[in-house]
């Protein structure tokens, strides 16, 4: 019977190391942010009742009715519980980008031109989406 | 064998009939409940519901994201914009959590994932923009049709554990897409390579677009394309699908975040419930009859797809 052999290369291991740490951190952030929000440990931009009265509306109509934090604007409301919870979700959206930076440099170290380029172009696509330019971001 | 098959379909069929004969009751109950129920009841209900969904999703071998959007948009009062935004985050959180061990074991292949996700992530951004711009009834109608299509794919799909590739295509050779992994079932190393890479790239454009448009995790489509079209072994296909999903869903999720289609009040209990449920489901995996659960899930998905279709047609609101 053959013993199990691990075939992951250095790039995969570098990606996995960042992924593991960044994901664990994101789960902690998301849960802590939500506890602060839901138990109103910090003041809120919008009362929770007002959010629930409007969550049946389209996103665009919802934000016309109430001024809940969203997009990068949430950073300007950092001291508010709902903004903090929202920012923790923004961090979750950034985890893959951290991993791609690690993968890009690991491929570069191996002089693998094709995947260095693919990794950094992929990173640029995600950064482009994250800036909100294309979606009229806030 | 025939009797066993009949028995396996009885539970799902009864469930389907119950849903079909109760639309008026369901509608009346929904209207009254939405008006009177406190926010925390919905939030708590969502957590419990997604926890259960996480358990059955992993037992049935489907992604949580594909179940979340049609079922939550059918039976909870949230607008489908918020449900889709949350659906992407549910699928993303699940993929990120599952990712590291799959990479370390060498089951997931980063080169295969990155080659397909680059083009898929661009189309998922386009899908998200289109999805958030379309009228609600069009989204419901197309979501219903898509979910019914997925139900058929899940019902009919026959994966191939170890596809035999006679000759890899030239693009896959240029992109260095081949590998080796240790197979715990065979107790030996398995070498693999792929073919039909250009066809795969085109299919991942379509998959990315649909994932972004409907907020669905796309494991239901990624795995058959990797396995049946490109010819990657099933284990490699399932593991690599997780990475394509994490990149594509990240791209689309940012569009939903910037359009204000993510509410932490809904998103966090959904993500937490699904992740917790998935962990419990993984532990129960060897103790339950997975075929029966899979059939129940396929039936639920069919009902939710039908509900979305009827909503889109204005027949059952």
Image (cartoon, coloured by chain):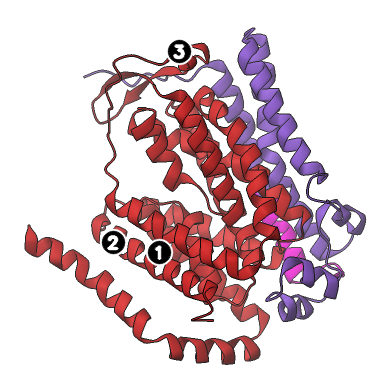
Give the secondary structure at mark 1.
helix
Q: Kindly identify the residue that appears in the image at 27 percent across and 70 percent down.
A: B12
Q: Chain of mark 1?
A: B
Q: Chain of mark 2?
A: B
Tag 2's secondary structure? helix
SS assignment at label 3: helix
What is the spatial separation of the Cα atoms under label 3 and label 1, in whole angstroms?
A: 39 Å
Q: Is residue B103 left or right of residue B189?
A: right
Q: Main secondary structure of the magenta part?
A: helix
Question: What crowding class fits label 2: few (fewer than 14 Cα within 10 Å), some (14-19), or many (20 or more)?
Answer: many
Is residue B10 something that shows in the picture?
A: yes
Residue B270 image point, x, y percent:
58, 62
Who's the residue at 78% across and 79% down the image? A50
Q: Which residue is mark 1?
A: B301
Q: Residues within 10 Å of mark 3 (few under 14, many from 20)?
A: some
Q: Which residues are magenta?
A: A27-45
Q: Which chain is red?
A: B
* Residue A113 part of the magenta segment: no
| Residue A66 image point, x, y percent | 84, 73
Q: Would you name the residue on which mark 3 appears?
A: B170
Q: Residue at x 38, y 39 (%)?
A: B224
Q: Residue at x 30, y 46 (%)?
A: B157
Question: Decide: marks 3, 1 in contact (CB < 8 A)?
Answer: no
């Amino acid at each position: 019977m053959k013993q199990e052999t691990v075939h992951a290369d250095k790039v995969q291991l570098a990606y996995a190391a960042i992924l593991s740490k960044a994901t664990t951190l994101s789960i902690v952030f998301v849960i802590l942010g939500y506890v602060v929000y839901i138990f109103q440990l910090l003041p809120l931009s919008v009362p929770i009742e007002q959010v629930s009265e409007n969550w049946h509306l389209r996103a665009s109509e919802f934000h016309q009715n109430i001024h809940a934090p969203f997009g990068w604007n949430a950073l300007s409301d950092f001291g508010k519980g709902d903004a903090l919870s929202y920012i923790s979700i923004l961090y979750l959206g950034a985890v893959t980008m951290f991993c791609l930076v690690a993968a890009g440099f690991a491929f570069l170290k191996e002089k693998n031109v094709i995947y260095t380029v693919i990794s950094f172009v992929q990173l640029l696509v995600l950064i482009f989406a994250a800036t909100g330019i294309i979606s009229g971001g806030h | 064998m025939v009797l066993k098959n009949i028995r396996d379909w009885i539970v799902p069929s009864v469930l389907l009939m119950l849903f079909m004969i109760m639309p008026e009751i369901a509608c009346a109950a929904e209207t009254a409940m939405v008006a009177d129920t406190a926010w925390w009841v919905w939030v708590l209900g969502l957590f419990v519901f997604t926890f259960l969904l996480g358990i059955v999703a992993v037992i049935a071998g489907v992604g949580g994201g594909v179940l979340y959007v049609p079922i939550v948009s059918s039976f909870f009062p949230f607008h489908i914009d918020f449900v889709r935004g949350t659906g992407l985050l549910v699928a993303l959180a699940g993929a990120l959590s599952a990712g590291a061990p799959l990479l370390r074991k060498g089951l997931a292949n980063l080169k295969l994932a990155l080659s397909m996700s680059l083009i898929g992530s661009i189309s998922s951004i386009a899908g998200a923009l289109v999805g958030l711009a379309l009228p609600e009834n069009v989204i419901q109608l197309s979501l219903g049709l898509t979910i019914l299509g997925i139900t058929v794919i899940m019902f009919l799909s026959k994966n191939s554990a170890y596809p035999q590739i006679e000759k890899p295509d030239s693009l896959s050779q240029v992109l260095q897409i081949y590998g080796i992994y240790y197979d715990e079932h065979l107790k030996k190393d398995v070498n693999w390579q792929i073919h039909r890479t250009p066809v795969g790239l085109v299919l991942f454009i379509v998959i990315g677009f649909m994932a972004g448009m409907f907020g669905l995790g796309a494991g239901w489509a990624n795995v058959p394309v990797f396995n049946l079209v490109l010819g990657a072994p099933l284990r490699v296909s399932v593991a690599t699908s997780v990475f394509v999903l994490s990149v594509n869903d990240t791209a689309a999720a940012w569009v939903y975040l910037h359009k204000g289609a993510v509410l932490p009040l809904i998103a966090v209990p959904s993500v937490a419930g699904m992740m917790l449920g998935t962990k419990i489901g993984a532990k129960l995996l060897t103790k339950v009859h997975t075929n029966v659960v899979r059939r129940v899930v396929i039936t639920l998905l069919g009902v939710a797809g039908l509900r979305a279709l009827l909503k889109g047609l204005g027949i059952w609101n």
